[in-house]
Image (cartoon, helix red, strand yellow):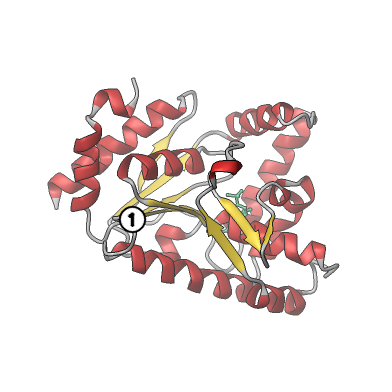
């Protein structure tokens, strides 16, 4: 059953207009389905969708493109402050499965930031305090503008690792989405095969576990559920069921406020 069949769309739009601040934070590990959930939930609510992970990927891509060594913390930090990252809704000529268009210094890097080389280095880059300082400030600024409800959309859905704990701890609704490492590796493996990039499942699982460990054990803004986050484990569940569950949680939240 999908969220739209379970709840009327007008009803969901109304829920989104009652939420204050109009900010939903969704965190979780790689391939947990948080981006799919955030994108679809934002669509139902007519909220802006901001996947904060693409900003860390964009910096990592810029670092690699400029030939900066990922281990050079100072140079990577400088790059994070200097780089111009722009995230836009896809244009009519960009309907190729992307959720957003990501520009780095004016260049469309939407698919380049999904390259295995970026995957391998993004956890290291995103653990640097200076990188986090630069990107957290940008994310918070956008979230507060939309959270007031007077921007060009009635609210915002942020997705990432630390949106509920660090970026917007005042978000009205916080979700923590998770699934077993094996299920998440299967999803990522399928995704890579679909893109014509066959890789070994065991390698995908090992990379996933390695990234989870770096993301959750880093000193600054580690991946963890906020104390007041509502957990959704979607192991064995499809995207529609996860969306329906999130809408139910949102409805309860608005009713209890
Ligand atoms: O969600 P993703 O796989 O696209 O995220 C890429 C990386 O960015 C991930 O390894 C951790 C980092 N990240 C982060 O540190 N904080 C966020 N809020 C979002 C992503």
Residue at left 40%, top 31%?
A: 242
* Residue extending farthest top: 1
Report the side of 9 relative to 257 (left or right): right
What residue is disc 1 on? 153
Please identify the residue farthest to the front as the structure is shown. Answer: 93
Q: Nearer the viewer, residue 119 or 107?
A: 107
Q: Is residue 59 visible?
A: yes
Quadrant, the N terminus: top left
Q: Is mark 1 within 8 Å of ligand 1?
A: no
Query: Where 47 falls versus 83 (above or below)?
Result: above
Q: Which quarter of the picture shows residue 192?
A: top right
Q: Is residue 159 above or below residue 2?
A: below
* Residue 252 in picture, x, y percent from top left: 19, 41
- The mark total stands at 1
**Would residue 223 be visible to someone looking at this image?**
no
Residue at left offset 35%, top offset 50%:
47
Element class at badge 1: loop
Q: Is residue 18 left or right of residue 151?
A: left
Horizontal side of 106 relative to 139 (left or right) equals right
Does residue 110 lie above or below 134 as drawn?
above
Q: Quadrant of residue 85?
A: bottom right
In depth, the one of 129 and 154 nearer the eye is 154
Identify the residue shown where x is 76% and y is 66%: 63
How far from the left and from the top, in percent, is residue 214?
A: 65, 56
Q: Quadrant of residue 10?
A: top left
Q: Is residue 3 above or below residue 91?
A: above
Residue 87 position, x and y percent, is: 54, 58
Residue 80: % across, % down: 66, 72
- Badge 1 local density, few (<14 within 10 Å), some, or many (20+)? some
Rendering quadrant holding ligand 1: bottom right
| Residue sitting at x 34%, y 59% | 152
């Amino acid at each position: 059953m999908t969220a739209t069949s379970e709840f009327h769309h007008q009803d969901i739009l109304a829920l989104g207009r009652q939420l204050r601040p109009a900010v939903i934070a969704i965190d979780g590990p790689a391939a947990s389905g948080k981006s799919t959930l955030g994108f679809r939930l934002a669509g139902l609510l007519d909220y802006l969708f901001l996947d904060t992970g693409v900003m860390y990927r964009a910096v990592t891509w810029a670092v690699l493109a400029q030939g900066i060594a990922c281990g050079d913390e100072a140079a990577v930090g400088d790059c994070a402050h200097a780089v111009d990252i722009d995230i836009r809704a896809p244009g009519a000529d960009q309907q190729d499965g992307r959720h957003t268009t990501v520009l780095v210094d004016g260049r469309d890097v939407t698919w380049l930031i999904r390259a295995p080389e970026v995957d391998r280095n993004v956890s290291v880059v995103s653990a640097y305090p200076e990188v986090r300082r630069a990107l957290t400030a940008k994310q918070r600024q956008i979230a507060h503008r939309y959270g007031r409800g007077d921007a060009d959309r009635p609210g915002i859905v942020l997705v990432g690792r630390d949106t509920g704990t660090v970026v917007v701890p005042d978000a009205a609704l916080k979700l923590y989405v998770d699934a077993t490492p094996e299920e998440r590796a299967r999803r990522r493996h399928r995704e890579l095969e679909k893109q014509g990039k066959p890789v070994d499942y065991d390698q995908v699982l090992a990379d996933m576990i390695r990234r989870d460990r770096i993301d959750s054990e880093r000193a600054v803004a580690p991946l963890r559920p906020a104390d007041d986050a509502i957990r959704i484990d979607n192991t064995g569940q499809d995207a529609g069921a996860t969306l329906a569950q999130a809408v139910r949680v949102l409805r309860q939240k608005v009713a209890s406020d």
